[in-house]
Image: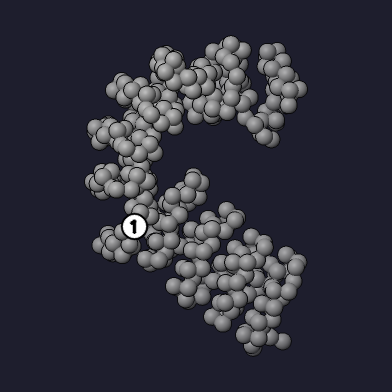
């Protein structure tokens, strides 16, 4: 009965969306609204996208919104969804924003690039790469139209680090002199992705930066380049005044040479006793007898997590014919917590090695 009156039909469906508590009915209503998508329902759909308790409904509302030709308002709405509690909704908003060659869309994506969520940041940089593809002249103007703020600088640093285009280096090196330490740290992190040993001198200067976050970023970057010179620099950084910087130096040393890092960290214990947990973690990662190490606290476990490649450990545990290697891999993997760790321990109860079965049984009993 509504076939000839889209507006009336849309209002009817919108009312159902507002009044019904049944998620199936709400999805049915939103699915039908997708077929109408007239400008008059924009406000209603916007409200659903922002407030509906069901992520699936919010996602469908987003799809309707982008089909309505009101670009600035759609971009504003998508930008607000970047803070949605559901990751699927955030990722969808990121993907859709990347389709708009628009200053507001670019600015919105740059604003969320400093998220600590690695997966979300990956989605954002992918979308930015798409947005910034095409005519270089137009893209340059688009980037210049974004205010020269800390957010823009950090965002561009992340993006250039991901793309690793040769022309990005001069821009990133310039950011190393920025007044804001967060910008400098982001530039160091981006330069590290190039894995270019010619940048070593440039990165080395940042080890002496007055800000501890920049120094930590520089240590991570130098560790990624590897080599004897990098090892010597990080050995010196173990005496940094900041404990977090010292911890990054310990991890960096291990990534360059695990056995040598143990000796260096041990030599610093009298001056920095808090490095003991790092030493225990390094010894565990190197396969030292675990019952002689001391307590595996949170810091020691985090060291093992960073130093030992979990996928490699899984492969050794499943495929190696060497008893000691399998036992070491088991012990590294036994540090996993939660449901995954519990399932692993349960399966280890049937392992052909008696030592592994005994340790798995003991760990499960203790928990």
Where residue 149 sits: x, y (%)? Answer: 34, 57
Q: In this view, does 91 lie above or below 363?
A: below
Residue at position x 51%, y 68% from top? 77
> In this rendering, would 361 be left or right of 177?
right
> In this rendering, would 169 be left or right of 354?
left
Residue farthest toward the bottom in the current orientation of the protein: 4
Residue at position x 70%, y 31% from top? 343
Using a 10 Å C-alpha cutoff, classify the residue at mark 1 as few (fewer than 14 neighbours), some (14 to 19) or many (20 or more).
few
Q: Foreground: 129 or 259?
A: 259
Quarter assignment of residue 325: top right
Residue at position x 45%, y 16% from top? 269
Q: In which quarter of the image is the C terminus?
A: top right
> In this rendering, would 82 be left or right of 168?
right
Q: Is residue 348 above or below residue 290?
A: below
Residue at position x 57%, y 77% from top? 43
Where residue 68 sits: x, y (%)? Answer: 51, 75
Examine the rendering and report whether any part of residue 274 can be seen: yes
Q: Is residue 51 above or below residue 35?
A: above
Give the labeled residue for mark 1: 149
The colour scheme of the drawn protein is one colour
> In this rendering, would 286 be left or right of 4?
left
């Amino acid at each position: 009965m509504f076939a000839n009156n889209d507006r009336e039909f849309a209002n009817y469906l919108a009312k159902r969306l507002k009044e019904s508590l049944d998620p199936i009915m709400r999805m049915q209503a939103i699915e039908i609204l997708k077929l109408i998508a007239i400008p008059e329902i924009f406000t209603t759909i916007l409200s659903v996208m922002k407030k509906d308790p069901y992520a699936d409904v919010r996602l469908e509302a987003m799809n309707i919104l982008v089909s309505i030709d009101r670009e600035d308002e759609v971009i504003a709405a998508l930008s607000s969804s970047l803070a949605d509690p559901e990751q699927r909704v955030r990722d969808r908003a990121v993907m859709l924003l990347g389709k708009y060659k628009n200053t507001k869309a670019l600015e919105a994506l740059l604003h969320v690039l400093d998220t600590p969520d690695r997966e979300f940041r990956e989605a954002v940089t992918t979308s930015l790469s798409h947005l910034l593809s095409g005519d270089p002249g137009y893209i340059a103007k688009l980037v210049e139209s974004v205010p020269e703020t800390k957010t823009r600088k950090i965002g561009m640093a992340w993006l250039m680090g991901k793309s690793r285009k040769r022309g990005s280096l001069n821009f990133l090196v310039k950011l190393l002199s920025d007044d804001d330490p967060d910008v400098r740290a982001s530039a160091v992190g981006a330069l590290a992705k190039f894995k270019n040993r010619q940048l070593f001198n440039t990165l080395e200067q940042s080890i002496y930066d007055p800000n501890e976050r920049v120094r930590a970023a520089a240590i991570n970057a130098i560790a990624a380049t590897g080599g004897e010179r990098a090892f010597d620099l990080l050995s010196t950084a173990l005496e940094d005044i900041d404990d977090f910087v010292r911890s990054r130096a310990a991890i960096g040393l291990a990534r360059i040479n695990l056995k040598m890092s143990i000796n260096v960290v041990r030599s610093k214990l009298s001056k920095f006793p808090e490095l003991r947990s790092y030493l225990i973690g390094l010894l565990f990662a190197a396969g030292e007898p675990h019952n002689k190490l001391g307590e595996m606290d949170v810091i020691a476990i985090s060291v093992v997590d960073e130093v030992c490649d979990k996928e490699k450990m899984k492969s050794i545990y499943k495929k190696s014919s060497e008893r000691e290697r399998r036992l070491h891999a088991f012990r590294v993997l036994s540090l996993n917590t939660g449901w995954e760790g519990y399932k692993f321990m349960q399966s280890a109860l049937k392992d052909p090695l008696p030592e592994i079965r005994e340790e798995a049984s003991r760990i499960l009993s203790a928990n």
